[in-house]
Amino acid sequence: MPFADWLRARRERRDEHLPAAEEARLLKLYWNRAELKRSLDDLEEEVRQLRDLLKQQQALLHRAGEDAEGLEQVLANPELGFGAMVHFALRGLWRAGRVQLQQVATEMRRQYEEQERRAQQTGLQSARRLRLQEADGRIAAAQEQVTAARAQVAAAERDLISLSSPWYYFQRQEQREVVADARIREHGAAAALESLRSVRATLLKEPLTEYTGLSVESRRWVNLHVLALAQVLVARLMPEGIAPQMKLAWQRDLGSLRYGTRTESLGRLAQLNGAASLLRTTAVVAPQMREQAERLAQAAVYRSGMDTLPAGVTLEADTAQLPGSNFTAAQLLADDYFEIGRLLLP
């Protein structure tokens, strides 16, 4: 081929490949641009969320500044200042009661989880031991079959050796088939034994099932004890009218409440100090909590097998009332004392 023709053909082949290469390059640029656009959209969304969070924090900071300024104005007034002390003492009682409920809920949940996890592991280990015993029994039986098959092979081979004389030609042919059959049975028995040993080894390596969480029954008992403790605490504060005032102080700000004169506020503070000691007497509260939880359990009826809180009607029952108080668990939940709804397990 002349050089000019060769050069022209080479140029034509190159021109044919150029559009494909250009198309691949453009496609790569397109996907790179799409990926960059997705990244930009993600960054813009993150910036928007951060701006919203910043606005929320600024609003909280502004509100905190207003609260601090309002508190300064209240404390600057001798008459209102003592009322502020009463207000925050009531809030402190509310917080102390909620801390007790949280501690009971956390501790009881931990105890029940440990008990259930231990019981589950014990049950799984017992089941595994039974399965291993069954596997060992099958392996022992298979081992006996292998031993018997090997003995049959040895006996058949001895009989074959005894037929070495020429006149036993036909008998030797038949005996060779007997030996072959015995060896097949031996191989089958050995394979079955190896399979059983493999199954046992796999069983040993199987992990025990992970604990999946508290059972419904345990969650019910935790909730009943939390309800019972809340009832006990409210019953101890109810006679002096502290419980409703405590709830009101938690729900409303200081500027919307009045607590009387300085003398009245000081008297109220002394009363609240005594009430705080009532909440701290765990030696008395704990037995009352357990007794009340038992009473609640006796009266409780659940709508379904998965419910962890009794039906409201049963919580209104007289048998669920704490002696000396007409404040039922249903009222406690309705008024959300100590924000108990957040502490109960679903």
Image (tube, rainbow, N blue to C red):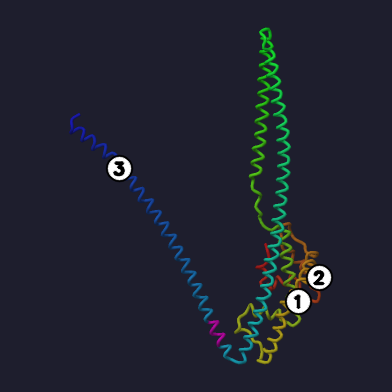
Which of the marked residues, 3 or 1, is nearer the chain's N terminus?
A: 3
Magenta region includes residue 327: no
Measured Cα–Cα span from mark 2 to mark 3: 89 Å
* Residue 139: quadrant of the picture: top right
Q: Residues within 10 Å of mark 1 (few under 14, many from 20)?
A: some
Which of the marked residues, 2 or 3, is nearer the chain's N terminus?
A: 3
* Residue 157: quadrant of the picture: top right
Residue at the location (72% across, 58% down)? Answer: 115
Measured Cα–Cα span from mark 1 to mark 2: 15 Å
Q: What element carries label 1?
A: helix
Q: Name the residue under label 3.
A: 19
Whole-percent x, y for residue 161 in the image: 67, 15
Main structural element of the magenta stretch: helix, strand or loop? Answer: helix
Q: Which amino acid does label 2 sit on?
A: Asp
Q: Is mark 3 on a helix, strand or loop?
A: helix
Q: Name the residue under label 2.
A: 318
Q: What element carries label 2?
A: helix
Which of the marked residues, 1 or 2, is nearer the chain's N terminus?
A: 1
Looking at the picture, tell me which residue is in the foreground, 139 or 10. Answer: 139
Whole-percent x, y for residue 213 in the image: 67, 57
Q: Which amino acid does label 1 sit on?
A: Ala
Looking at the picture, tell me which residue is in the foreground, 249 or 138. Answer: 138
Whole-percent x, y for residue 189 in the image: 68, 29
Q: Is residue 267 above or below residue 52?
A: below
Residue at the location (66% across, 24% down)? Answer: 184
Quadrant where the N terminus is found in the figure: top left
Quadrant where the C terminus is found in the figure: bottom right
Tell me the magenta residue range.
66-72
Q: Which amino acid does label 3 sit on?
A: Pro
Q: Mark 1 points at which residue?
A: 235
Checking the image for residue 57, the label placed there is none
Looking at the picture, tell me which residue is in the foreground, 40 or 214. Answer: 214
